[in-house]
Amino acid sequence: MSRVGASLGLASILAWALLLLFGLAFPPTLAGGLALAGGFALAFGFQTFLVIRGAVALLAPFGVMLPALALGSVLAGFGVALPGFTTWEIAGFLLAYTAFLCCAFGVIPCDVYRLGYAPLPVAGMVQAVCAYGALSGNWPVALVAVLGQCFWALKWGSSNWFDYVLHILMWPVALVILSARLF
């Protein structure tokens, strides 16, 4: 499952990148269709190519959130309306994720990452994210948390729940989006 999962994650990321390119020349629906077809064709049809294997090595584990964000952008090209994030949510995420990364790298002497290995803290975090999703109306966030917990419980990849719901690329992406909104 990990090879198929990695290919699916890469396909969604490639579709996201292709959407940006195709969106310059084609109408949104056509750009979205071409991006999806191209992303999946590249990820599954060219698995033995060095560039594709390198992208998997660089970006894996993809988890659930990064492909979900990518597919959400591609679906928006088809006119599917998904709830977005407010500027305050993105700013809060950046602050919290920066603190999380500082803890993971040992800059802050608190090992928050270890909570992702234990069932009770994971269940509590999933419940908290689901409650936030219900209160804010942002149901995709709750879906990502639950899918991450399912994959974690089934041991489809990492043994830490955080690896399913977070990805290091989310930090620069959130920073760019926040900067574009503020400046």
Image (spheres, rainbow, N blue to C red):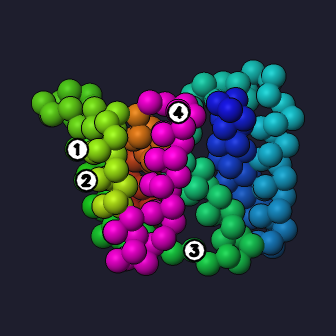
Residue type highlighted by circle 3: Leu
Which residue carries the number 4 mark?
Answer: 155
Mark 4 or mark 1, which has the lower sequence index? 1
Decide whether residue 95 is among the magenta residues. no
> In front: mark 4 or mark 1?
4
Which residue carries the number 2 mark?
Answer: 95
Residue type highlighted by circle 4: Lys
> In front: mark 3 or mark 4?
4
> Residue 83: x and y, percent?
51, 75
Q: Which image quarter is the N terminus in?
A: top right
Q: Secondary structure at mark 1?
A: helix
> Residue 30: x and y, percent?
84, 68
Residue 55 visible (yes or no): no
Which residue carries the number 3 mark?
Answer: 82
Closer to us: 144 or 46: 144
Crowd around label 4: few <14 · some 14–19 · many ≥20 (10 Å): few
Q: Secondary structure at mark 4?
A: loop
Residue 99, label in figure:
1
Determine contact: label 2, label 1, CB under 8 Å.
yes
Cα distance between the residues tagged 2 and 1: 6 Å
Cα distance between the residues tagged 3 and 1: 28 Å
Q: Secondary structure at mark 2?
A: helix
Q: Secondary structure at mark 3?
A: loop
Cα distance between the residues tagged 4 and 2: 29 Å
> Residue 146: x and y, percent?
48, 55
Residue type highlighted by circle 1: Ala
